Image: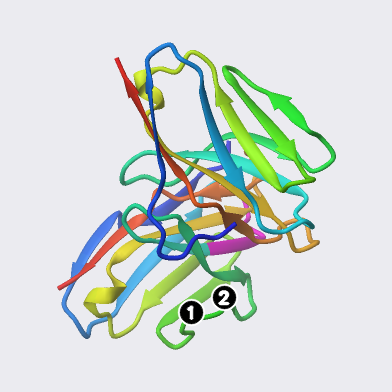
Amino acid sequence: GESVGLHLPTLSVQEGDNSIINCAYSNSASDYFIWYKQESGKGPQFIIDIRSNMDKRQGQRVTVLLNKTVKHLSLQIAATQPGDSAVYFCAEKYGGTSYGKLTFGQGTILTVHP
Amino acid sequence: GAVVSQHPSWVICKSGTSVKIECRSLDFQATTMFWYRQFPKQSLMLMATSNEGSKATYEQGVEKDKFLINHASLTLSTLTVTSAHPEDSSFYICSATGGLGQGYGYTFGSGTRLTVV
């Protein structure tokens, strides 16, 4: 869901560990979800997506889990690397149309220590 | 892949002046464009949604007269911050849809850092 005036939570891990980043979304009617990575001073970069009719999707080193019952998303990063250090956001799409507006969640700062 | 170009990447302006930010889809026609604002260590907040040839739809709390959006063509949308004040200093990011990139076709620009002095 949207965060107004809140500062981002942080997650600190060691290189090689698995990371799990969580996100609570706001609208039970949202039909599509995306995880983005944002590095300082840059726009969001697509990581992985999932439709509401799925509960799990895997990519390269990343897995997204969707729990519609509690409106929760998680992003799992395997064998986390220093280059994964960034801010991670989930985003939800709703609006009924193909290009409904995309609303961003709170975000999490991931720091990976070598 | 789909590419969205945003200019300028950073701008410093004096209080009371206006600043225009451009968002261009380079290799596709953008059905819809979105404008976001992001304050330091915060999430992206949607400001408005624009469709080519029609008026933008603003989110609640966003001043239409202060943040003018023009979507004159299928490849260009502009955001003009009028009579800018220091509190308007922020990172502005556009997103365009309609391309064939990943993420359902939502492609983001690289953002514009606006500093009002």
Q: Residue A22: x and y, percent?
A: 57, 38
Residue at 63%, 55% in the rendered image: B29
For disc 1, the chain is B
Q: Residue B10: x and y, percent?
A: 25, 57
Residue at 23%, 82% in the rendered image: B17
Q: Nearer the viewer, residue A92 or B111?
A: A92
Q: Nearer the viewer, residue B55 or A57?
A: A57
Residue at 63%, 53% in the rendered image: B97
Q: Regarding mark 2 in the picture, which secondary structure is present there? A: loop
Residue B75 seen in the figure: yes
For disc 2, the chain is B
> What amino acid is labelled 1 in the image?
Val
- The residue to which callout 1 is attached is B62
In the displayed structure, B18 sits above or below A111; it is below
Q: Dot 2: within a 10 Å radius of its alpha carbon, few (fewer than 14), some, or many (20 or more) residues?
A: few
Q: Which residues are magenta?
A: B28-34
Mark 2–mark 1 CB contact (< 8 Å): yes
